[in-house]
């Protein structure tokens, strides 16, 4: 029985309870922890990562830090059952594996890798050969022929275009200019516009001066005029870009330049449609 005094404390009126005797716990009586020795052998870092993987705390912390931009890459061992299941829609599966796109095709789909001809920008002669083998040079459109011939000079500076013009020699109107004139100092290297065979190398009696003609096959020819000299012979095979002559001002010429012509089945056409 207890009573309460004025200050609020309770005072015992009955006999005092016997004090509890603390039981001595010895190492022999303590239950054995089967995993204690294994934990002692593991490093503190591994214990932390195992706990984080088992509880999911590490994954949640990694997601939060990555979202704020504080961590670029977070790697935590995926040891939790959630991450190991790999079920679609589970957070662990999304974090541990990336979704691979599916590639499908119809059962009757046919893939054909065969090609009749192959040409690349690294093989411009292949493009020209393919173009001329499919049709006569006279039927090739301007859109298809553009860029099929190489430039006869390293630098092209137009001096007089193809077509009707005022004659620079007589001053008369209505002269038909059969080629494209490019300004070039005398002695400038002149290159073959494409691979072919030299069919003429000599003096042109109709104003071309020293002239070289190259046959590229299937009705396509190029001519190089007013040359100061040339270093090829009739019947010689040349490759695209080979130096075949030096520019000059021979024949009906008023100054150093290159008169370049493109002939299709014996008729001149605008060279700019092939360059």
Image (spheres, rainbow, N blue to C red):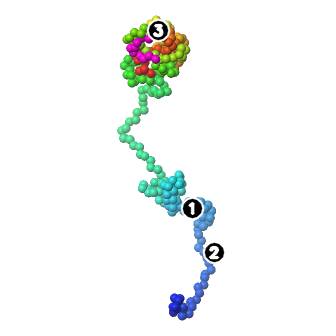
Q: Which residues are magenta?
A: 159-168
User: Which residue is depicted at the point 47% across and 27% down?
Assistant: 121
Between 239 and 230, the one lying in front of the other is: 230
Q: Is residue 14 magenta?
A: no
Viewer-nearest of labels 2 and 3? 3
The residue tagged 2 is 27
How packed is label 3: few (under 14 Cα within 10 Å), some, or many (20 or more)?
Answer: some
> Where residue 268 appears, x then y in whole percent?
40, 14
Give the labeled residue for mark 1.
Answer: 48
Residue 255 place in picture, x, y as percent = 50, 12
Q: Earlier in the sequence, mark 2 or mark 3?
A: 2
Q: Compared with residue 41, is residue 249 higher up or lower down, i.e. above or below?
A: above
Residue located at (51% from left, 53% from top): 69
Q: Which mark is residue 252?
A: 3
- Label 3: element kind: loop
* Label 1, residues with CA under 10 Å away: few <14, some 14-19, many ≥20: few
Which percent across, then down, holds residue 81? 48, 60
Q: CA distance from mark 3 to mark 1?
A: 94 Å
Q: CA distance from mark 2 to mark 3?
A: 121 Å
The residue at 54%/11% (across/down) is 229
């Amino acid at each position: 029985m207890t009573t309460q005094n004025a200050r609020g404390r309770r005072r015992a009126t009955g006999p005092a309870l016997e004090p509890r005797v603390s039981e001595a716990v010895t190492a022999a009586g303590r239950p054995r922890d089967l995993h204690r020795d294994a934990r002692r052998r593991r490093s503190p870092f591994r214990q932390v990562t195992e706990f984080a993987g088992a509880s999911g705390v590490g994954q949640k912390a990694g997601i939060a830090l990555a979202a704020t931009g504080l961590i670029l890459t977070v790697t935590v061992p995926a040891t939790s059952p959630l991450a190991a299941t790999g079920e679609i829609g589970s957070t662990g599966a999304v974090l541990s594996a990336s979704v691979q796109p599916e590639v499908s095709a119809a059962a009757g789909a046919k893939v054909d890798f065969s090609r009749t001809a192959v040409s690349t920008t690294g093989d411009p002669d292949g493009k020209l050969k393919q173009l001329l083998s499919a049709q006569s040079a006279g039927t090739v459109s301007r859109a298809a022929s553009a860029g099929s011939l190489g430039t006869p000079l390293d630098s092209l500076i137009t001096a007089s275009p193809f077509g009707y013009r005022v004659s620079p020699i007589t001053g008369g109107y209505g002269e038909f200019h059969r080629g494209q004139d490019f300004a070039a100092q005398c002695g400038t290297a002149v290159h073959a516009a494409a691979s072919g065979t030299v069919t003429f190398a000599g003096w042109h009696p109709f104003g071309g001066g020293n002239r070289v003609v190259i046959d590229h096959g299937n009705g396509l020819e190029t001519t190089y005029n007013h040359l100061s000299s040339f270093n090829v012979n009739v019947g010689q095979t040349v490759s695209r870009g080979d130096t075949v002559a030096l520019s000059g001002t021979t024949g009906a010429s008023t100054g150093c330049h290159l008169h370049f012509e493109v002939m299709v089945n014996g008729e001149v056409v605008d060279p700019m449609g092939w360059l």
